[in-house]
Amino acid sequence: MAEIQTTKMSSKGQVVIPGAIRTRLGLEPGVQFVVIGEGDTIVLKPIAAPSMREFDEVMERAREAARRAGMKRSDVASAIAAVRSR
């Protein structure tokens, strides 16, 4: 079950995430968040780099999509060169 605690916002808009919640979620100083506001609800979602396994899975799906589209490595290199020349 979700842990419920209260906090308050400072005059600078800063909000302290209670220590017990930071510890349980493994949040360290400097962690970045996506902030979503909808109606009267605010969601803070930590941003984390994907694991190497997750990254490899994404890359394999991208490679497969490129193969199905008939793309070659030279197509990718050309696209990169075109963007960099802008």
Image: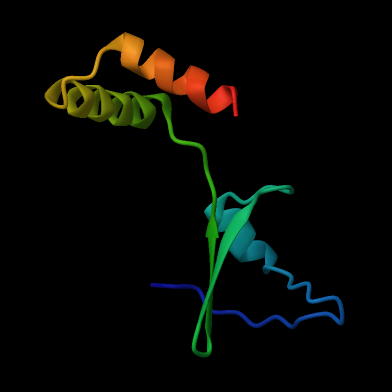
Residue 68: x and y, percent?
12, 25
In the picture, measured across the screen, residue 10 lies left or right of residue 37, that is right
Q: Is residue 3 left or right of residue 78?
A: right
Q: Residue furthest top?
A: 74
Q: Position of residue 29 (x, y in %)?
A: 74, 49
Q: Which percent across, then down, holds residue 64?
A: 18, 24
| Nearer-the-camera pick, 10 or 3 | 10
Residue at the right extreme, as displayed:
11
The residue at the far left in this view is: 68
Tell whether 32 sits left or right of 83.
right
The residue that appears at 51% across and 37% down in the rendered structure is: 49
Q: Give the vertical position of 5 relative to 46 (above or below).
A: below
Residue 86, above or below 48: above
Closer to the camera, 69 or 59?
A: 69
Q: Residue at x 43, y 31 (%)?
A: 51
User: Residue 54, percent across and down?
Assistant: 35, 32
Q: Quadrant of the C terminus?
A: top right
The correct choice, above or below, for 13 with respect to 56 in the image is below
Write the residue at 33% across / 16% down.
75
